[in-house]
Image (cartoon, rainbow, N blue to C red):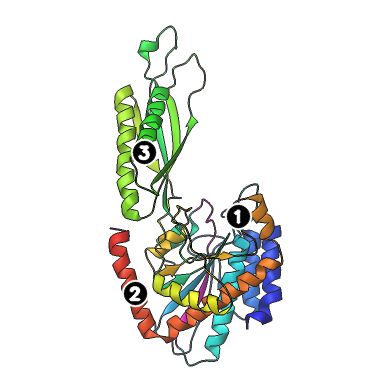
């Protein structure tokens, strides 16, 4: 079934690659994908979940009953990075998601299975939190299982995706002439420098994969004026939600100590781009792995390294989910110009089609096998107790 759509899906991915769009501005990509779904007989909803460039298409069997039959969602991404375009390969994620949906729905039409399959177009993964907003809008409330794949330097079933906080710490002091009246001022630059040093010292006490990244984004305006306002932007990463809550509390104390030492006022906020760690469902992954290996994919041993972050993490702690990495032709690191070029090559599409076929088979297995669904849900419930806390 996928082979019948292979050429057209590759064209879609290539057109998205040629027209990179930043988060929440993915107008061309969303139109290309929804037009293709409509051409293949699927009604689409756009905007979806309150987001202009999000979309939904779904297929449900004639006797579908939400109280009895499962719903599986396949997710697409299609936003690009500033300056380096589709260096994260989201054009290929879109191709895989649409391909999975088309293949699974065609198989459902010719079977006695009961269930519902959705494809959800989720914008703004690169710093916009599209899936987080969709979750808050209730877009996944009646979804039982979710899946997507992500281009990667190698095939990896459960990439070490970390939780991330995007935070801002602002210090408010009092300006004064640095020479004539320094004692009249409250130095907000001293506060932010002390906060930086506090965090730098905290780093050596953190556990493996707990990370801090920070910059002083505003340190003052003129050297002869004691700064009355400074700002630090920082990230916290950790392997579980429980871990990030612990680090978050320690970071807050570092900022409070700096404010207390300098007499400045502290304003600390988290922005909407904070993501959960990825809680991969190993039962679902085992089925995906089975079908990938049947197509010749090999999964090499993976060192225990820290990874990046994604808003799919938030989906994964709410719904049993997978987000495996797929090799697309060369062992090149994502978010590089070299990977951006790789994501536009014809060779990449063959790897994407294999992953789409495996996701389609996983979708059908979930619809057909109540024992598999029970096992997936049992693992999800047990994992969440230790992962989220």
Q: Residue at x 57, y 53 (%)?
A: 23
Image quadrant in which the N terminus is located: bottom right
Say which residue label 2 marks: 377
- Looking at the rendering, which quadrant does residue 190 occupy? top left
Element class at badge 1: loop
Location of mark 3 (residue): 204
Residue 143 seen in the figure: no
Residue 142 placement: quadrant: bottom left
* Numbered circle sitting on residue 25: 1
- Magenta range: 114-128
Nearer the observer, disc 3 or disc 2? Answer: 3
Residue situated furthest front in the rendering: 301
The local crowd at label 1, few if under 14, some if 14 to 19, many if 20 or more residues have their Cα within 10 Å, is some
User: Relative to the observer, which residue lies in front, 273 or 25?
Assistant: 273
| 382, 44: nearer the viewer | 382
Q: Are marks 3 and 2 in contact (CB under 8 Å)?
A: no
Residue at disc 3, secondary structure: loop
Q: Residues within 10 Å of mark 3 (few under 14, many from 20)?
A: few
């Amino acid at each position: 079934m996928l082979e019948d759509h292979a050429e057209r899906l590759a064209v879609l991915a290539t057109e998205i690659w040629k027209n990179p769009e930043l988060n929440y501005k993915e107008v061309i990509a969303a139109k290309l994908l929804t037009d293709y779904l409509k051409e293949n007989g699927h009604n689409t909803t756009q905007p979806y979940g309150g987001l202009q460039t999000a979309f939904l298409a779904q297929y449900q069997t004639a006797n579908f009953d939400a109280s009895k039959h499962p719903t599986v969602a396949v997710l697409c991404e299609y936003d690009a990075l500033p300056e380096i375009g589709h260096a994260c390969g989201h054009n290929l994620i879109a191709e895989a998601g649409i391909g999975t949906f088309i293949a699974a729905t065609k198989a459902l039409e010719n079977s006695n299975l009961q269930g519902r399959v959705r494809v959800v177009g989720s914008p703004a993964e690169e710093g916009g939190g599209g899936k987080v907003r969709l979750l808050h809008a209730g877009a996944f409330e009646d979804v039982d299982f979710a899946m997507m794949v992500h281009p990667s330097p190698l095939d990896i079933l459960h990439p070490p995706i970390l939780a991330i906080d995007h935070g801002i710490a602002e210090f408010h002091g009092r300006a004064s002439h640095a020479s004539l009246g320094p004692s009249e001022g409250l130095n907000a630059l001293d506060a932010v420098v002390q906060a930086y040093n506090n965090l730098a010292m905290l780093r050596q006490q953190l556990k493996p994969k707990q990370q801090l990244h920070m910059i002083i984004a505003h340190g003052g305006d003129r050297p002869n004026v004691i700064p009355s306002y400074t700002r630090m932007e920082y990230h916290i990463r950790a392997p579980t939600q429980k871990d990030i809550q612990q680090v978050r509390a320690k970071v807050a104390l570092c900022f409070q100590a700096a404010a207390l030492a300098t007499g400045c006022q502290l304003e600390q906020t988290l922005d909407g781009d904070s993501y959960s760690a990825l809680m991969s469902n190993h039962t679902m992954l085992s089925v995906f792995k089975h079908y990938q290996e049947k197509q010749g994919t090999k999964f090499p041993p993976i060192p225990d390294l820290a990874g990046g972050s994604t808003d799919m993490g938030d989906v994964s702690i709410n719904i049993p989910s997978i987000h495996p990495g797929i090799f697309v032709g060369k062992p090149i690191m994502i978010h590089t110009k070299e990977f951006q070029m790789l994501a536009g090559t014809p060779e990449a599409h063959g790897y994407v089609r294999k992953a789409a076929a495996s996701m389609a088979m996983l979708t059908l297995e979930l619809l057909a096998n109540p024992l598999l669904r029970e096992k997936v849900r049992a693992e999800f419930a047990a994992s969440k107790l230790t992962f989220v806390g």
